[in-house]
Each structure stands twice: as structure tokens, then as C-alpha cells.
Image (spheres, rainbow, N blue to C red):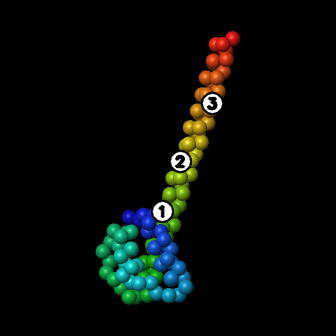
């Protein structure tokens, strides 16, 4: 399962790959196995490593989008709750004014 602490590692691997260099096979495979819960063996096959990194990057992007969606939903719910609190507060003030008259 992917964790936020994996994001910088995946971004580093992506940068290495995009610059045309080779990432450490053990690092790629260990991270891949951790994120996807697999037990793949270490390989020095460059296209295999690129594929693993691409899958890690896609998973990271999916996880980031999911986190952003959760944050946005939480903020929207908080705004709704704040609006309801303000409405009930105004009603309470209005009722106390009527009672004072």
C-alpha cells in the first residue's frame, strides 16, 4: 500500500528515469513490492525497471488525487457546518430579541 512517505522516493525515481539514467534495481523493486504487495525479484532489465517506475508513478498520482478529493470533501463539509452554525446563531439572536421586547 502506498503511503505519503513514498511520494518523494517515487518522484526521485521518476526524475532519474526521465533524465535517462538508471535507478538502483533493488530500490525500485523494494518500493514496488511494498506499494503493490508483491514479491517480485530484483532485475537489471532496464525496460522492466522503467515499467515498474511508471506503475509506481501512476499509483502515486492516483493516491494524490484521492487525498486531494478527501481534503476538498472535508473542507466542503466544514463550510456547510459553519454555515449551519451561523444560521442557527442568527435564529437564536433573533429569538432572544423577540423575547426581550
**Residue 38 appears at what percent x and percent y?**
33, 72
Q: Which residue is mark 2?
A: 74
Residue 26 placement (x, y as % from top left): 36, 81
Give me the C-alpha separation between circle 2 and circle 3. 20 Å
Q: Which of the image's four quarters has the N terminus?
A: bottom left
Residue 97 falls in image quadrant: top right
Residue sticking out furthest to the right: 101
- Tell me the tag on residue 23: none
> Foreground residue, 50 or 94?
94
| CA separation in Å, label 1 and label 2 | 16 Å
Residue 46 lies, in percent from the top left, at 43, 87
Q: Residue at x 61, y 36 (%)?
A: 83
Q: What residue is pinned by disc 3?
A: 87
Residue carrying label 1:
63
Visible residue check, residue 47:
no
The mark nearer the N terminus, 1 or 2, is: 1
Above or below: residue 77 compared with residue 70 = above
| Left or right: 65, with 83 as reference point | left
Residue 36, x across and y down, in percent: 37, 69
Q: Mark 1: give few (<14), some (14-19) or many (20+) Cα within 10 Å.
A: some
Q: Earlier in the sequence, mark 2 or mark 3?
A: 2
Q: Secondary structure at mark 2?
A: helix
Indicate the secondary structure of the residue bearing disc 3.
helix
Give the mark toward the camera: 1 or 3: 3
Amino acid at each position: 500500500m502506498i503511503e505519503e512517505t513514498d511520494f518523494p522516493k517515487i518522484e526521485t525515481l521518476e526524475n532519474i528515469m526521465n533524465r535517462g539514467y538508471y535507478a538502483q534495481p533493488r530500490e525500485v523493486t523494494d518500493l514496488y513490492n511494498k506499494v503493490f504487495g508483491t514479491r517480485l525479484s530484483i532485475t537489471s532489465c532496464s525496460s522492466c525497471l522503467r515499467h515498474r517506475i511508471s506503475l509506481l508513478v501512476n499509483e502515486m498520482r492516483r493516491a494524490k488525487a484521492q487525498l486531494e478529493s478527501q481534503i476538498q470533501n472535508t473542507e466542503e463539509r466544514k463550510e456547510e457546518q459553519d454555515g449551519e452554525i451561523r444560521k442557527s446563531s442568527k435564529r437564536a439572536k433573533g429569538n432572544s430579541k423577540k423575547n426581550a421586547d
